[in-house]
Amino acid sequence: MVKYLILQVVGILFAQTFHVTELMTLIMLSVLLLLLLTRLDHIVLPLIIICMMMFRWTAVQIPSIDITNPKGSFTGVVDWVKASKTGNRLKVSTVGDYPFSFIYTDRDNSKVLPGDTLHVNGNLVIPDPPRNPGQFDYGKYLKQKGISYILTKGKIEQIVEGEWSINRQFFEIQNSVRKIINTFVDAPFSGIMTGLILGDRSGIDEELKDRFQEIGVIHILAVSGLHVGYIFMMLSFLASGLNIRGKGQFWIIFAGLVFYAALTGFTTSVLRASLMAIMYSWGKMREKNISTWNIIAAAAVIILAVDPLQLFSPGFVLSFGAVWGILFTYPRLQQLDSHFPKWKEIRKNKVVRGVTNLTMVTIGAQIGTFIPVAVYFRFFPVWGFLSNLFIVFLAGVAVISGILTILSSFLYSGLASIFGHAAWSILWLLNMFSEIIFLLPFRKLPLGGLSILTVIVIFVVLVLWVWSIERKSIGIAAMATLLFWNFQIWSTLFTGDDVKITFLDVGQGDSCIIQDDQITILIDAGYGGFGRDMGQQIILPFLAYEGIKNIDLLIMSHPHSDHIGGISAILESVPVNAIWSTFTDYKSQLNTSNLDLCKSKQIPIEYVNPGEIYQLGKLTLTCLYPTERIGKSARNVNNASIVLRIDHEENSILFVGDMESEGETWVTKIPTINQMDIIKIGHHGSTTSSTDLFCNQVDAKIGIISVGKNNKFRHPSQEIIDRWENQGTQIFRTDQTGAVTVISNGSSFTYSMMLKNGSD
């Protein structure tokens, strides 16, 4: 079965790479079937498997259609309804000649059930690709769920009630379960209980979710194999209590697990664990020798046969990775008993043995999920084993209490109330443990900035250490570890003198991160307000992606919200050594709040003067403007923007904030702005900046305009673009290119854009 799974995965990858048509797949299948009559029949079965996967892949591909009228009315059937903080999210499959699915957020929370037919009016848009390095690819996420478009500015015109269906019935049951939990489990833990039972995290506080993710237990809120294990245990006890054996016990387990999987929406982890439990029960009933590896492989084969797209889903990889890690690691760690007699003696105590066994399982799961965790989350929870040791156990007890609460509510509300209060107490204890572990030092190990090859090598080293226990020799593992660390240490001696400058796409605002192998400089932090925080949403993910652990210098060009809005999120999450600010008496709640936060964290704020030169790493920073008198007297705070020249050997970059023509009059008197290599064009390309004299004097090779897509100010002005281009300046606009990354080697530049074609 394991070999069958490998062939299946090969087939999926082959189909994804070469995009073979359905007709060609059918022709290939026919040829292979004919080969069965020949002596080459031994190679036919693997090839048939690959062809079947290719056929299945092409069948599930989202159709690429040309929307001739993206704005209008659309009719479709609701596939599923999920609660969210902004309203119910609906997946709708259209009815007509061009079938496709779209997602729509119903903020009115209309009474919509799966199977209903909707007549909806709105605008269909294709999800944006990632516009910054390290940004979550929402479009890819939706595509894996079979969703092509998002309906915006939508309104439900008519709801036609659908007929009875299993999907519809289970949705009603889910709503009933939510009501029972909210009735008998008091806030604030009713949301956690709903997450544990149903996998619905819409009612959980964002702070708690972030905390659970950082300590490595976010998986308990996604309904995982752990929950299925407790359900399986309860069903087995039920069958034993009723004195039911053999086939009767199997059918109780089968029916119970299928019901629970349907109740949770057949999520990958639940489906995987349910399939494994059902196959295990079937084998026990038939008194067969059970191979756990065959069971897990069979579960993967079934899931991928139904939906090959799951192969690229984080849920699939994490779920099967965890099980693989446990199956590989646990029996080998158990062999420590035979190698260390004192350890075996200590483990004779039942409590110690239970705790150490659970720790071994946790270690195995963390090793098995190391690669996907490093790739998707870019950090490793250092205290993950401790978190799982206590919190996962408590979560399991809470699941049992929650299920008893739900079941007893149909018998006697007083009994349900008792179980509900017990569940609340367990969740309170769980939350307390999470807060304690969250306060421990070094709670996470950043893995951002590591290449995928380095991540794989670390994984191999970890596997070798576990494997060495079985071989009773640590020589190979120790040698691999030493070779890895030697490579890491010596490789730093061969790093170039390159400097990376990333102009992030923060919408209608500015943010640029400059880094070499010694220092990191952040210039502005984008917009903040009205539910948007570019520091939290864009800059912090980028820092994690790059593996940047602290900021040496944060420069606030001027105190407008589109430049300093994300600073508080940065200060709360990343150590900042120093801050530069401009001379101004500008008052705003945001600016005052940021300055107060700097003081509370004892971060020094410096007000640099024109002519002052600083050396940071490989960079030379020269402040050109403004003086204290000009900055404080400026009628428009834009003209108090810090103007900064940054040099890397022969290469030069000019930052001007939002400086307008009045400020440019002063700056053009400074000869050091002549013939720059790169300029961050002022005020998002507005006509208030970039005068003829200024453009002529700067005469830049490359100009970056940081500007929001379809912004209400209609920035940048075509007049300004033409003015710069007439100077021979190549223009990059973040609304069209996404983030722009420039690499300086000291004598020349190379650059790249997130959106390769320069547009969406």
Image (cartoon, rainbow, N blue to C red):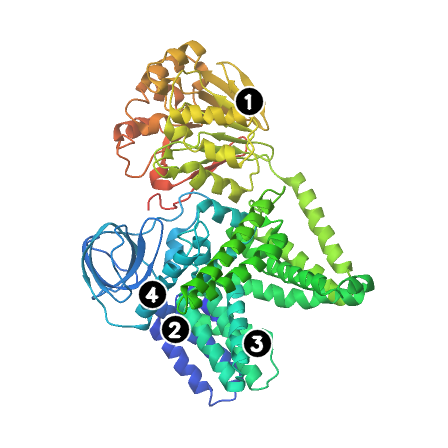
At label 3, which amino acid type do we have? Asn
At label 1, which amino acid type do we have? Pro
Numbered mark located on residue 370 in the image: none
SS class, disc 1? loop
Residue at the outermost right position: 341
Between the C-alphas of marks 4 and 1, the distance is 55 Å
Disc nearest the viewer among 2 and 4: 4
| Label 3 crowd bin: few (<14), some (14–19), many (20+), radius 10 Å | some
Between the C-alphas of marks 2 and 1, the distance is 63 Å
Residue 700 visible in the shown view: no
* Residue at the disc numbered 4: 171
Numbered mark located on residue 55 in the image: 2
> Vertical placement of 633 versus 103: above or below?
above
Disc nearest the viewer among 4 and 1: 4
The answer to whether the residues at label 4 and label 1 have Cβ atoms under 8 Å apart is no
SS class, disc 4? helix
The answer to whether the residues at label 3 and label 1 have Cβ atoms under 8 Å apart is no
The answer to whether the residues at label 3 and label 4 have Cβ atoms under 8 Å apart is no
> Vertical placement of 590 versus 419: above or below?
above
Q: Position of residue 349 (x, y in %)?
A: 74, 64
